[in-house]
Structure formats: structure tokens, C-alpha cells
Amino acid sequence: MAAKTDTEVIIGGRVITLSGFESEEYLQKVASYLNSKLSECSQIEGFKHQPIDMQSIMVQLNISDDYFKAKKEIEDIQAQLDEKDKELYDLKHELIATQIKQENTEKKAQALKEELDETSKKLLLMEALQKNQNHDKNHDKKI
């Protein structure tokens, strides 16, 4: 388990000590985010004229809005990732099926080639025998 970190940060112009099990860099990043939200809300017309509790609520609403938008983006990205995973899974299975078909086709082609070679040998042998028989018949006629 990580050690607890205490670090001083500035939020809204006030020095605050943050404690947590995250790194000091992370805690500074959180403080920086809060400062940017405070600054962003300060730019809204009428924000500074609101009571402090209302200003706090507006900042919280802005942070909540960021959170839900980020959460939705993550969900969308996860859905895209899931779809890509499914596509990849389907493509891998299609590749395997195609490889199996190719192997079977190559085996059939090899078997047909061997059959053709055997048939060619038989044909040559038969032609040679027929030629030999024709030669013998012609030779017998002369005698």
C-alpha cells in the first residue's frame, strides 16, 4: 500500500493541505483542475454577485457536468472498443476458416495432381504397349 501523501496546494487563492494516497503530482493536478473550474465559473456573468454557497454549487455543477461528459465519452469509447473486439474476433475466425479451406483445397489439388500423374503414366504405358503391339503386328505381317 502506498504511503499517505500530504501536500500544500493553492485553491482559489488559499493555501490548503491535501492528504491522500496519491502522488504529490496527482494532488497538484487536482488542485489545478479546481482552480481552472473556479476561473471558468468566474468568467460567467453575475457569478461573483452570487452568494458563496451558490457559487460553490455552480462550480460543483460544472465539475459534475465534466464528470458525466467524461463518463459518457468513456462509455462510447468502450462500446467502440467492444465492437472492434467483436470485429477482430469475427475476422480471426474468418481467417481460420479460410486457412482451413485453403489447406483442404491444397490437399485436393495435390491428390488430383497425383491422380493426373498416375493417369498420365498409365496413358504413356498404354500408348507404348499399343505402339509395341502395332509394331509386332506389322512385323508379323512381313514375315
Image: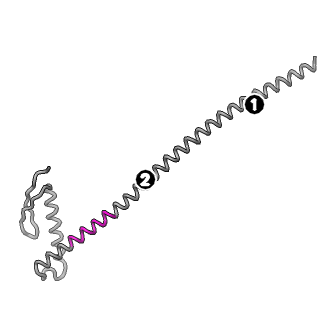
- Between 138 and 86, the residue placed more toward the observer is 86
- Name the one closer to the observer, 4 or 127: 4
In this picture, is 128 found above or below 108? above
The number of callouts visible is 2
Label 1 SS: helix
Q: Is residue 67 magenta?
A: yes
According to the picture, the residue beneath numbered tag 2 turns out to be: 88
Q: Quadrant of residue 71?
A: bottom left
Q: Secondary structure at mark 2?
A: helix
In percent of the image, x 11 and y 78: which residue is there?
53
Q: Is residue 104 left or right of residue 129?
A: left
Crowdedness near tag 1: few (<14), some (14–19) or many (≥20) residues, C-alpha within 10 Å: few
Which numbered disc covers residue 9? none
Stretch of the chain drawn in magenta: 62-75
The residue at which mark 1 appears reads as: 123
Amino acid found under the numbered disc labelled 2? Leu
Q: Position of residue 34 (x, y in %)?
A: 16, 68
